[in-house]
Amino acid sequence: MFNRPQVRDILANGQVDTTTEVLGWVVTKRTQKTFSFIEINDGSALNGLQVIVDNTIPNYDETIPLAGTGASIRVTGRILASQGAKQRIEIHADTLEVIGTIPDSYPLQKKRQSPEFLRNNAHIRSRTKVMGMSTRVRSACAQAIHRFFNEHNFQYIHTPIITASDCEGAGEMFQVTTLDLENPPRLGDKSDAPVDFTQDFFGKKTFLTVSGQLAAENLACGLSRVYTFGPTFRAENSNTTRHASEFWMIEPEMAFADLHADADLAEAFLQGVIKDVMNTCQEDLEFCEQIITNKKFKSPFFDGSKVSLLQTLEQVVNTPFQRITYTEAIDLLNKSGKKFEHSTNWGDALQTEHERYLSEELFKAPTIVTDYPAEFKSFYMYLNDDGKTVRAMDVLVPRIGEIIGGSQREDRLDVLKERIAHHGLDEKDYWWYLNLREFGTVPHAGFGLGFERLVMYVTGLQNIRDVISFPRTPKHAEF
Ligand code: 4AD
Ligand code: MG
């Protein structure tokens, strides 16, 4: 039976004096003289169900010792009004069956393990409160994203994972090949002659995609509003708390839209999704507030700041985002009187310390920075009339820095060709992308939201490794 009530349903709707069946794992067990307390959870809710097992049930003496933390069990029993204040109901067991036992060395015995310990046991960490929460909120974020786009007429599209073009031009791609790496075919007899990729699986060099954008642009120039939601891969060797080598990205793309429309979409989208998740994940987010911002709770996930997580989210949903140009941002950074590690001359990239200053200290709100210098941005961004800046935008949020990167796309064929050449790319590789500008070109714009960064933002978790079940980072592909 797939639709038997789960812990979540029983806690919310279980009728007192009816009988029920619960399947799950033992969270804790306390044995008294004539009965035992078991907390059981199946991962559907933050807190499990309290079960009281009297020593009068069949096989009590044999079963109870096997029902330790981590064991999987099946309970049938009667729902009673709870004596304790913590929960509305509890279960008085008629039968207890141990499905899967645990050896003495079950790693999750101790309470409040460190994030590092849990990552090293990623295969079972989803049974902890914090990882159960993180996984449920991640799922709710994904559902909210699809709901938002569905309500606004965006078609959900799927773009290739294997690609021949480096969308971001950063050269941080994982190569995909079936050539024999020990002895590849070469374009000549010498052992150091260039490898002959015409003999590779696709007849040319291919990679895992860093972004679905170029394909999304294609479909937007036909369907007007589309979005991707898929995995992307970056071989950048930055071992930070905000970078993963494999992460999920949401990339909407709109035709007949400029940078302002793009910023409007980004703002409505973040606000809509966060509002939705605050509604659907109330209990989980209240738990986040405790572990992230309440020092007394003594959680290893405490972030050291005094800022309430829920109030911050509330504020994001209800306050208009700040909007400034890159040039204004540089000005504000230079006037701030703060000493930054990285320089803030016009033309320098904004670093995380700058991004966090703007959104966290100065504006205390999500901030959209637009019109960046063309020099450090990708080839596809629309060149402004000043010839120096492009219609790019980054959405910066407190605690995280950049959460969204996007732009209006260059839709003028001649300018785009110049930009491609300027970036040292080969026009021939982009013939299909250039075609879009030849046949009924339109202004169009879009952005990319790092999905894990969104989940980090909503939960307050500070390490990207804790919002994805099996993280991929440099030197780490375990599980
Ligand atoms: O700013 P990025 O590189 O933009 C693009 O890829 C564009 N093609 C998007 C578009 O316009 N369609 O990446 C977009 C977002 C970033 O703002 C960040 O949230 C996230 O992707 N991101 C990462 N998240 C986790 N780990 C990494 N290594 C990330 N790199 C980027
Ligand atoms: Mg970016």
Image: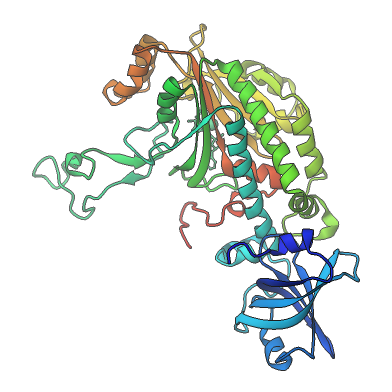
Residue 261 visible, this orientation: yes
Instruction: Say above or below: 34 vs 459.
Output: below
Quadrant position of residue 23: bottom right
In the rendering, at what x and y percent does residue 54 appear? 81, 86
The answer to which of 348 and 170 lies nearer the viewer is: 170
Q: Quadrant of residue 15?
A: bottom right
The furthest residue to the top: 385
Instruction: Please tell me which residue is depicted at 75% across the width and 24% down the height of the picture.
Output: 320
Q: How many marks?
A: 0
Above or below residue 182? Residue 89 is: below
Q: Would residue 210 be found to the left or right of residue 367 on screen?
A: left
Residue 39 falls in image quadrant: bottom right
**Residue drawn at the location 60% of the way across and 83% of the way down:** 103
Q: Is residue 90 left or right of residue 155?
A: right
The residue closer to the viewer here, 135 or 382, is 135
Image point (64%, 34%), residue name: 341
Q: Residue at x 19, y 42 (%)?
A: 195
Between 2 and 38, which is closer to the camera in this rendering?
2
From the viewer's perspective, tell me whether residue 407 is left or right of residue 215. Answer: right
Q: In the image, residue 68 lies at what x, y percent?
A: 69, 81
Q: Position of residue 283 (x, y in %)?
A: 77, 53
